[in-house]
Image (spheres, rainbow, N blue to C red):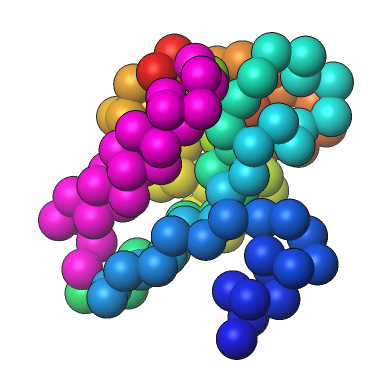
Amino acid sequence: MYAEYLREREDKQILEIEHGFTVYGYNCVPGMSVPHVYIKDNYVRPEHRKTGIARTMADQICAEAKTKGIKILLGSVDGGAHGAHESLLVLIAYGMKLYSINDNAIWMAKEI
């Protein structure tokens, strides 16, 4: 039901699988003039982490984005959030590079 709410009220897309989900959107990052897909939230149940599930979901989102002509994947980490270091490592392992930092937000980008 929460996924339906996000789709309707916030124009977000949700990819749900058995052990996790990803919330993402197209061309939704203010100030980013290039067409993009932004992975806003990613969650994998703790017992299924480090098994490739997050990568599989990101790959699916990137494949979908490519069919829409999108060539940039964005992700961000709140530098002050619990687990921020681990989140950054995941984005780097996925091939993302630093795009910008403002306030506590660390923005990462990858060509797809």
Residue 6, given in percent of the width and then of the height, sits at: 69, 68
Residue 108, given in percent of the width and then of the height, sits at: 55, 25
Residue 15, compared with residue 93, is above or below; it is: below
Residue 47, compared with residue 79, is above or below; it is: below
Taking the magenta stretch, the answer to whether it contains residue 43 is no
Judge left or right: residue 54 versus residue 15: left
What secondary structure characterizes most of the magenta part? helix
Quarter occupied by residue 95:
top left
Judge left or right: residue 9 versus residue 89: right
Residue 109, compared with residue 28, is above or below; it is: above
> In which quadrant of the rendered image does the C terminus lie?
top left
Which contiguous range is marked in magenta? 48-71
Give the residue drawn at x 72%, y 22%.
Answer: 101
Which of the two residues, 61 or 46, is positioned nearer the viewer here?
61
Judge left or right: residue 20 versus residue 13: left
Give the residue drawn at x 58%, y 55%.
Answer: 13
Judge left or right: residue 111 versus residue 51: right
Which of the two residues, 108 or 32, is positioned nearer the viewer here?
32
Quarter occupied by residue 50:
bottom left
Residue lying at the far bottom in this picture: please name it.
Answer: 1
Give the residue drawn at x 24%, y 47%.
Answer: 56
Q: Is residue 91 visible?
A: no
Residue 23, given in percent of the width and then of the height, sits at: 55, 56
Give the residue drawn at x 24%, y 61%.
Answer: 49
Residue 36, given in percent of the width and then of the height, sits at: 61, 25
Which of the two residues, 89 or 91, is positioned nearer the viewer here?
91
Residue 59, compared with residue 71, is above or below; it is: below
